[in-house]
Image (tube, helix red, strand yellow):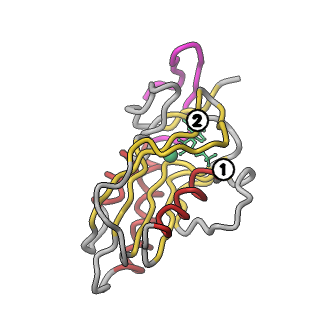
Amino acid sequence: MERKIKLHDKSFRLFIPNDEIESAIDKVAARMNADFSGKEQPPILVCVLNGSILYTAELMKRLDFDAELLSIRLSSYEGTNSTGFVREVMGLSRSIEGKEVIILEDIVDTGATIETLVSMLMEKGAASVKVSTLLLKKEVYKRDIPIDYVAIEIPTRFIVGFGLDYNELGRNLKDIYVLDE
Ligand code: 5GP
Ligand code: MG
């Protein structure tokens, strides 16, 4: 496990090692298993591409109830800053009408993305929408939408790894790194 890395023009240092990430995901999965086991209709997991790919994969392996999987792609970030404006880049491939939906996000920062996404999914007829995120920037997030399942709370720093990128690099890192300023 390398403690310092470089992506493009920026340096990052180790912040959350993989074993901590995995045990945080264990805990979220246990809560979801308690909440969703024994439901008649399988919920739909919505993976928010690309950042949530690793979170979705690790979480899904730990779920012991039936669940469907759909993916959606939104974009709000350029470089290391949120533009505050959320675009849909790739939509859902199937109807979610009448279904219970669980959004799987990599990170909730200002909440612009999650707010847009929750209202989009409600408009598409979801019966309910729950939100899970691997990482929550707690000091920044001030919106009303409850983040039902948070794996790890982090301070207001720019991080990469475990699915999260800096200009498309760093997604494959198994640990999480923070921008070294
Ligand atoms: P929000 O809309 O909540 O401000 O931002 C959500 C999206 O911005 C996340 O899904 C993620 O793609 C990106 N994002 C926010 N904070 C970070 C960060 O610290 N690192 C990276 N790599 N992406 C981030
Ligand atoms: Mg995301």
Q: Residue furthest left?
A: 66
Q: Is residue 18 magenta?
A: no
Quadrant of the snapshot with the C terminus = top right
- Depth order, front residue of 28/123: 123
Ligand 1 closer than 8 Å to label 2 CB = yes
Is 120 rendered above or below residue 180?
A: below
Q: Determine the image quadrant of residue 25.
A: bottom left
In this picture, residue 96 sits left or right of residue 149: left
How many numbered circles are shown? 2
Residue 137 is labelled as 1
Is 181 rendered above or below residue 135?
A: above
Ligand 1 closer than 8 Å to label 1 CB = yes
Q: Which numbered mark, 1 or 2, is in the foreground of this view?
A: 2
Q: Position of residue 140 (x, y in %)?
A: 73, 50
User: What residue span does the magenta drawing correspond to?
Assistant: 1-17
In this picture, residue 149 sits left or right of residue 59: right
Q: Which residue is identified by label 2?
A: 77
- The amino acid type, in three-letter code, at marker 2 is Tyr
- The amino acid type, in three-letter code, at marker 1 is Lys
Badge 1 density bin: few <14, some 14–19, many ≥20, Cα 10 Å: some
Label 1, label 2: how far apart the Cα atoms are: 15 Å
Is 35 rendered above or below residue 157?
A: below
Dot 2 falls on a residue whose secondary structure is strand
Q: Position of residue 46 (x, y in %)?
A: 38, 59
